[in-house]
Amino acid sequence: MTPRETTRRTFGIRKYFAFSGEVWGLIWKNKRLFVKFLLLYALLSAVIVGLMSQENFAALRDALNEVPNLGFFNKYSTLFSNAMTSGSSATDTGQQILAALLFLYGWLTLIWLLRRIVGGDGQKLKLRDGLYTGGAPVLATATILLVILVQLLPFALVLLAYASVTAVGWINTGIQIENMAAWCALAVAAIMTLYWICSSFIALIIVTLPGMYPFRALRAAGDLVIGRRLQLVLRLLFMVLPMVLMWLLVLIPAILIDGWLGLTWQPLVPIVVLLLTTLTLIWCATYIYLLYRKMVDDPTPLTPTIREKLRKNRLSAEAKLKVNAAAKAKVKTKKHQDA
Protein backbone atom coordinates (compact mmCIF):
# COMPACT_ATOMS: atom_id res chain seq x y z
CA MET A 1 0.00 0.00 0.00
CA THR A 2 1.24 3.48 -0.87
CA PRO A 3 1.40 5.65 2.30
CA ARG A 4 -0.81 8.70 2.48
CA GLU A 5 2.25 10.87 2.88
CA THR A 6 3.33 9.86 -0.62
CA THR A 7 1.76 11.55 -3.61
CA ARG A 8 2.20 11.47 -7.37
CA ARG A 9 5.44 12.13 -9.15
CA THR A 10 6.00 12.83 -12.81
CA PHE A 11 6.62 10.11 -15.36
CA GLY A 12 8.84 11.30 -18.21
CA ILE A 13 7.29 9.24 -21.00
CA ARG A 14 5.62 9.97 -24.31
CA LYS A 15 1.89 9.71 -24.97
CA TYR A 16 0.26 6.31 -25.35
CA PHE A 17 0.31 5.95 -29.13
CA ALA A 18 3.70 7.65 -29.44
CA PHE A 19 5.20 5.27 -26.90
CA SER A 20 3.67 2.27 -28.70
CA GLY A 21 5.24 3.58 -31.90
CA GLU A 22 8.58 3.77 -30.07
CA VAL A 23 8.21 0.12 -29.06
CA TRP A 24 7.41 -0.96 -32.61
CA GLY A 25 10.29 1.18 -33.87
CA LEU A 26 12.74 -0.62 -31.59
CA ILE A 27 11.44 -4.00 -32.78
CA TRP A 28 11.60 -2.95 -36.44
CA LYS A 29 15.10 -1.51 -36.09
CA ASN A 30 16.34 -4.86 -34.81
CA LYS A 31 14.00 -6.94 -36.98
CA ARG A 32 16.62 -9.46 -38.04
CA LEU A 33 17.37 -10.40 -34.46
CA PHE A 34 13.71 -10.59 -33.48
CA VAL A 35 12.74 -12.53 -36.61
CA LYS A 36 15.38 -15.13 -35.74
CA PHE A 37 13.98 -15.35 -32.22
CA LEU A 38 10.42 -15.56 -33.61
CA LEU A 39 11.24 -18.49 -35.90
CA LEU A 40 13.33 -20.35 -33.31
CA TYR A 41 10.79 -19.93 -30.50
CA ALA A 42 7.89 -20.91 -32.77
CA LEU A 43 9.78 -23.99 -33.98
CA LEU A 44 10.64 -25.10 -30.43
CA SER A 45 7.08 -24.46 -29.31
CA ALA A 46 5.70 -26.52 -32.19
CA VAL A 47 8.09 -29.40 -31.46
CA ILE A 48 7.90 -29.39 -27.65
CA VAL A 49 4.36 -28.21 -27.00
CA GLY A 50 2.61 -28.78 -30.31
CA LEU A 51 0.15 -26.85 -32.46
CA MET A 52 -3.56 -26.49 -31.97
CA SER A 53 -5.56 -29.27 -33.60
CA GLN A 54 -6.50 -28.46 -37.18
CA GLU A 55 -8.97 -31.37 -37.19
CA ASN A 56 -10.89 -29.94 -34.22
CA PHE A 57 -10.89 -26.48 -35.77
CA ALA A 58 -12.14 -27.85 -39.10
CA ALA A 59 -14.84 -29.85 -37.32
CA LEU A 60 -16.03 -26.72 -35.49
CA ARG A 61 -15.98 -24.75 -38.75
CA ASP A 62 -18.05 -27.37 -40.56
CA ALA A 63 -20.49 -27.61 -37.65
CA LEU A 64 -21.00 -23.85 -37.66
CA ASN A 65 -21.59 -23.92 -41.43
CA GLU A 66 -24.50 -26.29 -40.88
CA VAL A 67 -26.20 -24.07 -38.29
CA PRO A 68 -29.04 -22.14 -40.01
CA ASN A 69 -29.26 -18.36 -39.61
CA LEU A 70 -26.10 -18.19 -37.52
CA GLY A 71 -24.82 -14.98 -39.05
CA PHE A 72 -21.40 -13.93 -40.26
CA PHE A 73 -20.37 -12.18 -37.05
CA ASN A 74 -21.44 -14.98 -34.70
CA LYS A 75 -19.73 -17.63 -36.80
CA TYR A 76 -16.35 -15.96 -37.15
CA SER A 77 -16.30 -14.56 -33.61
CA THR A 78 -16.77 -18.15 -32.39
CA LEU A 79 -13.96 -19.40 -34.63
CA PHE A 80 -11.74 -16.50 -33.55
CA SER A 81 -12.26 -17.14 -29.84
CA ASN A 82 -11.73 -20.89 -30.34
CA ALA A 83 -8.45 -20.26 -32.16
CA MET A 84 -7.21 -17.93 -29.41
CA THR A 85 -8.12 -20.26 -26.54
CA SER A 86 -6.78 -23.40 -28.28
CA GLY A 87 -3.32 -22.06 -29.00
CA SER A 88 -1.46 -25.32 -28.25
CA SER A 89 -2.06 -29.02 -27.80
CA ALA A 90 -0.40 -29.23 -24.36
CA THR A 91 -2.73 -31.43 -22.37
CA ASP A 92 -0.65 -33.48 -19.94
CA THR A 93 1.41 -32.16 -17.04
CA GLY A 94 4.76 -32.83 -18.71
CA GLN A 95 3.94 -30.73 -21.76
CA GLN A 96 2.63 -27.90 -19.61
CA ILE A 97 5.86 -27.85 -17.57
CA LEU A 98 7.90 -27.80 -20.78
CA ALA A 99 5.72 -24.98 -22.13
CA ALA A 100 6.28 -22.97 -18.92
CA LEU A 101 10.06 -23.51 -19.11
CA LEU A 102 10.10 -22.53 -22.77
CA PHE A 103 8.21 -19.33 -21.99
CA LEU A 104 10.55 -18.57 -19.09
CA TYR A 105 13.70 -18.99 -21.18
CA GLY A 106 12.16 -17.04 -24.04
CA TRP A 107 11.34 -14.15 -21.70
CA LEU A 108 14.85 -14.13 -20.19
CA THR A 109 16.46 -14.24 -23.63
CA LEU A 110 14.38 -11.28 -24.80
CA ILE A 111 15.17 -9.21 -21.71
CA TRP A 112 18.89 -9.94 -22.09
CA LEU A 113 18.80 -8.90 -25.76
CA LEU A 114 16.76 -5.77 -25.03
CA ARG A 115 19.16 -4.67 -22.30
CA ARG A 116 22.07 -4.92 -24.73
CA ILE A 117 20.12 -3.19 -27.53
CA VAL A 118 19.13 -0.23 -25.35
CA GLY A 119 22.70 -0.11 -24.06
CA GLY A 120 23.96 0.46 -27.60
CA ASP A 121 25.26 -3.02 -28.45
CA GLY A 122 22.53 -3.91 -30.92
CA GLN A 123 24.79 -3.98 -33.96
CA LYS A 124 27.08 -6.66 -32.50
CA LEU A 125 24.40 -8.86 -30.94
CA LYS A 126 23.74 -12.43 -31.94
CA LEU A 127 20.81 -14.55 -30.89
CA ARG A 128 23.03 -17.32 -29.59
CA ASP A 129 24.55 -14.91 -27.05
CA GLY A 130 21.14 -14.37 -25.50
CA LEU A 131 20.30 -18.09 -25.62
CA TYR A 132 23.49 -19.11 -23.82
CA THR A 133 23.68 -16.21 -21.35
CA GLY A 134 20.19 -14.88 -20.73
CA GLY A 135 18.83 -17.91 -18.86
CA ALA A 136 21.02 -17.48 -15.75
CA PRO A 137 18.34 -15.93 -13.43
CA VAL A 138 15.75 -18.60 -14.24
CA LEU A 139 15.10 -19.55 -10.59
CA ALA A 140 14.78 -15.93 -9.45
CA THR A 141 12.39 -15.16 -12.30
CA ALA A 142 10.32 -18.25 -11.51
CA THR A 143 10.02 -16.99 -7.92
CA ILE A 144 8.64 -13.65 -9.16
CA LEU A 145 6.14 -15.52 -11.34
CA LEU A 146 5.00 -17.51 -8.30
CA VAL A 147 4.50 -14.25 -6.41
CA ILE A 148 2.37 -12.97 -9.31
CA LEU A 149 0.26 -16.13 -9.15
CA VAL A 150 -0.28 -15.57 -5.43
CA GLN A 151 -1.28 -11.96 -6.13
CA LEU A 152 -3.85 -13.22 -8.65
CA LEU A 153 -5.58 -15.39 -6.04
CA PRO A 154 -8.06 -12.70 -4.81
CA PHE A 155 -9.41 -12.15 -8.32
CA ALA A 156 -9.55 -15.92 -8.89
CA LEU A 157 -11.57 -16.34 -5.68
CA VAL A 158 -14.02 -13.61 -6.74
CA LEU A 159 -14.35 -15.25 -10.16
CA LEU A 160 -14.93 -18.64 -8.53
CA ALA A 161 -17.59 -17.17 -6.26
CA TYR A 162 -19.36 -15.62 -9.26
CA ALA A 163 -19.30 -18.94 -11.15
CA SER A 164 -20.65 -20.76 -8.08
CA VAL A 165 -23.60 -18.43 -7.45
CA THR A 166 -24.39 -18.41 -11.17
CA ALA A 167 -24.37 -22.21 -11.33
CA VAL A 168 -26.91 -22.57 -8.50
CA GLY A 169 -29.20 -19.95 -10.03
CA TRP A 170 -28.77 -17.15 -7.48
CA ILE A 171 -27.66 -14.83 -10.29
CA ASN A 172 -29.24 -14.90 -13.73
CA THR A 173 -26.95 -14.91 -16.74
CA GLY A 174 -29.08 -12.38 -18.60
CA ILE A 175 -28.95 -8.61 -18.32
CA GLN A 176 -30.35 -8.38 -14.80
CA ILE A 177 -29.50 -5.96 -12.02
CA GLU A 178 -27.83 -8.65 -9.89
CA ASN A 179 -25.73 -9.84 -12.82
CA MET A 180 -24.65 -6.28 -13.59
CA ALA A 181 -23.69 -5.77 -9.94
CA ALA A 182 -21.67 -8.98 -9.99
CA TRP A 183 -19.81 -7.88 -13.14
CA CYS A 184 -19.07 -4.52 -11.52
CA ALA A 185 -17.61 -6.38 -8.53
CA LEU A 186 -15.51 -8.50 -10.90
CA ALA A 187 -14.28 -5.36 -12.68
CA VAL A 188 -13.31 -3.74 -9.37
CA ALA A 189 -11.49 -6.90 -8.28
CA ALA A 190 -9.64 -7.09 -11.60
CA ILE A 191 -8.54 -3.43 -11.43
CA MET A 192 -7.40 -3.77 -7.79
CA THR A 193 -5.47 -6.95 -8.66
CA LEU A 194 -3.76 -5.23 -11.59
CA TYR A 195 -2.99 -2.25 -9.34
CA TRP A 196 -1.38 -4.68 -6.89
CA ILE A 197 0.71 -6.72 -9.33
CA CYS A 198 1.91 -3.91 -11.62
CA SER A 199 5.13 -3.56 -9.63
CA SER A 200 5.71 -7.31 -9.96
CA PHE A 201 5.84 -6.91 -13.76
CA ILE A 202 8.67 -4.41 -13.28
CA ALA A 203 10.31 -6.85 -10.86
CA LEU A 204 10.47 -9.37 -13.72
CA ILE A 205 12.90 -6.96 -15.38
CA ILE A 206 14.87 -5.99 -12.27
CA VAL A 207 15.43 -9.60 -11.21
CA THR A 208 17.44 -10.27 -14.38
CA LEU A 209 20.20 -7.91 -13.19
CA PRO A 210 23.39 -9.71 -12.11
CA GLY A 211 23.40 -10.66 -8.44
CA MET A 212 19.78 -9.62 -7.86
CA TYR A 213 17.56 -11.67 -5.53
CA PRO A 214 13.80 -11.97 -6.17
CA PHE A 215 12.45 -10.32 -3.03
CA ARG A 216 15.02 -7.55 -3.26
CA ALA A 217 13.81 -7.03 -6.83
CA LEU A 218 10.23 -6.79 -5.55
CA ARG A 219 11.23 -4.12 -3.02
CA ALA A 220 13.19 -2.21 -5.67
CA ALA A 221 10.22 -2.36 -8.06
CA GLY A 222 7.90 -1.11 -5.32
CA ASP A 223 10.20 1.88 -4.68
CA LEU A 224 10.40 2.53 -8.42
CA VAL A 225 6.63 2.60 -9.07
CA ILE A 226 5.60 4.43 -5.92
CA GLY A 227 3.73 7.58 -6.89
CA ARG A 228 3.39 6.26 -10.47
CA ARG A 229 1.32 3.14 -9.90
CA LEU A 230 -1.88 4.41 -11.49
CA GLN A 231 -0.01 5.65 -14.56
CA LEU A 232 1.73 2.28 -14.82
CA VAL A 233 -1.59 0.43 -14.63
CA LEU A 234 -3.00 2.53 -17.47
CA ARG A 235 0.12 1.87 -19.55
CA LEU A 236 -0.14 -1.88 -18.95
CA LEU A 237 -3.81 -1.85 -19.94
CA PHE A 238 -2.99 0.06 -23.11
CA MET A 239 -0.32 -2.53 -23.93
CA VAL A 240 -3.11 -4.98 -24.77
CA LEU A 241 -4.72 -2.75 -27.42
CA PRO A 242 -2.08 -3.05 -30.20
CA MET A 243 -1.94 -6.80 -29.66
CA VAL A 244 -5.71 -7.15 -29.98
CA LEU A 245 -5.64 -5.14 -33.20
CA MET A 246 -2.81 -7.27 -34.56
CA TRP A 247 -4.67 -10.50 -33.77
CA LEU A 248 -7.81 -9.17 -35.43
CA LEU A 249 -6.00 -7.97 -38.55
CA VAL A 250 -4.01 -11.19 -39.04
CA LEU A 251 -6.05 -14.04 -37.58
CA ILE A 252 -9.46 -13.15 -39.06
CA PRO A 253 -8.13 -13.15 -42.69
CA ALA A 254 -6.45 -16.50 -41.96
CA ILE A 255 -9.76 -17.91 -40.71
CA LEU A 256 -11.55 -16.55 -43.80
CA ILE A 257 -8.98 -18.13 -46.12
CA ASP A 258 -9.25 -21.41 -44.21
CA GLY A 259 -13.03 -21.38 -44.64
CA TRP A 260 -12.93 -20.49 -48.33
CA LEU A 261 -10.40 -23.21 -49.15
CA GLY A 262 -12.04 -25.76 -46.84
CA LEU A 263 -8.71 -26.91 -45.41
CA THR A 264 -8.81 -30.19 -43.51
CA TRP A 265 -5.27 -31.16 -42.56
CA GLN A 266 -3.27 -28.10 -43.68
CA PRO A 267 -2.56 -26.18 -40.43
CA LEU A 268 -2.92 -22.61 -41.70
CA VAL A 269 -4.74 -21.22 -38.66
CA PRO A 270 -2.58 -23.12 -36.09
CA ILE A 271 0.63 -21.76 -37.65
CA VAL A 272 -0.75 -18.21 -37.67
CA VAL A 273 -1.80 -18.56 -34.02
CA LEU A 274 1.67 -19.84 -33.09
CA LEU A 275 3.41 -16.92 -34.82
CA LEU A 276 1.03 -14.39 -33.27
CA THR A 277 1.62 -15.87 -29.80
CA THR A 278 5.38 -15.54 -30.22
CA LEU A 279 5.05 -11.99 -31.54
CA THR A 280 2.86 -11.16 -28.53
CA LEU A 281 5.67 -12.33 -26.24
CA ILE A 282 8.16 -10.11 -28.10
CA TRP A 283 5.82 -7.12 -27.93
CA CYS A 284 5.05 -7.48 -24.20
CA ALA A 285 8.72 -7.96 -23.24
CA THR A 286 9.79 -4.89 -25.26
CA TYR A 287 6.92 -2.75 -23.96
CA ILE A 288 7.50 -3.60 -20.29
CA TYR A 289 11.28 -3.23 -20.60
CA LEU A 290 10.98 0.24 -22.15
CA LEU A 291 8.53 1.22 -19.38
CA TYR A 292 11.13 0.12 -16.86
CA ARG A 293 13.85 2.10 -18.61
CA LYS A 294 11.71 5.25 -18.66
CA MET A 295 11.16 5.00 -14.90
CA VAL A 296 14.84 4.35 -14.22
CA ASP A 297 15.99 7.23 -16.46
CA ASP A 298 13.53 9.67 -14.85
CA PRO A 299 15.16 10.79 -11.57
CA THR A 300 12.14 12.84 -10.43
CA PRO A 301 11.76 12.50 -6.65
CA LEU A 302 8.47 12.12 -4.87
CA THR A 303 6.41 15.31 -4.73
CA PRO A 304 5.87 16.29 -1.09
CA THR A 305 2.30 16.58 0.10
CA ILE A 306 0.89 19.57 2.00
CA ARG A 307 1.19 17.58 5.23
CA GLU A 308 4.85 16.85 4.52
CA LYS A 309 5.51 20.51 3.71
CA LEU A 310 3.84 21.67 6.94
CA ARG A 311 5.77 19.08 8.93
CA LYS A 312 9.05 20.13 7.28
CA ASN A 313 8.30 23.81 7.93
CA ARG A 314 7.44 23.07 11.55
CA LEU A 315 10.65 21.11 12.04
CA SER A 316 12.71 23.85 10.41
CA ALA A 317 11.01 26.47 12.61
CA GLU A 318 11.71 24.42 15.73
CA ALA A 319 15.32 24.00 14.65
CA LYS A 320 15.66 27.77 14.14
CA LEU A 321 14.19 28.42 17.59
CA LYS A 322 16.68 26.02 19.13
CA VAL A 323 19.57 27.67 17.30
CA ASN A 324 18.42 31.16 18.39
CA ALA A 325 17.97 30.02 21.96
CA ALA A 326 21.42 28.45 21.98
CA ALA A 327 22.92 31.66 20.51
CA LYS A 328 21.19 33.83 23.11
CA ALA A 329 22.34 31.55 25.91
CA LYS A 330 25.90 31.72 24.55
CA VAL A 331 25.76 35.54 24.46
CA LYS A 332 24.47 35.70 28.05
CA THR A 333 27.19 33.32 29.17
CA LYS A 334 29.87 35.44 27.51
CA LYS A 335 28.53 38.66 29.08
CA HIS A 336 28.49 36.99 32.48
CA GLN A 337 32.08 35.86 32.03
CA ASP A 338 33.15 39.38 30.94
CA ALA A 339 31.45 40.89 33.95
Image: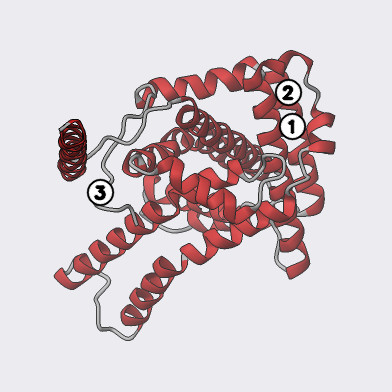
| Residue 195, numbered circle | none
Per the image, the residue denoted by label 3 is: 5
Instruction: Tell us which disc is closer to us: 3 or 1.
Output: 3
Residue type indicated by callout 2: Leu
Among the 4 quarters of the image, the one containing residue 206: top right
Residue type indicated by callout 3: Glu
Instruction: Tell us which disc is closer to us: 3 or 2.
Output: 3
- Report x, y in % for residue 118: 62, 21
Per the image, the residue denoted by label 2 is: 33
- In this rendered view, identify the residue nearer to me: 48 or 144: 144
- In this rendered view, identify the residue nearer to me: 293 or 268: 293
Residue drawn at x 44%, y 48% as measured from the top left = 198
* Residue 136 located left or right of residue 304: right
Residue drawn at x 66%, y 37% as measured from the top left = 275
Residue drawn at x 51%, y 34% as measured from the top left = 292
Per the image, the residue denoted by label 1 is: 37
Circle 2: is it few (<14), some (14-19), or many (20+) Cα within 10 Å?
some
Q: Is residue 201 visible?
A: no
3D distance between C-alphas at marks 2 and 1: 6 Å
Label 2 close to label 1 by CB (< 8 Å): yes
Query: Helix, strand, or loop for circle 1?
Result: helix
- Report x, y in % for residue 6: 28, 45
Q: Is residue 208 visible?
A: yes
* Disc with the residue nearer the chain's start (3 vs 1): 3
The quarter of the picture where the N terminus appears is bottom left
Count of labels in the image: 3
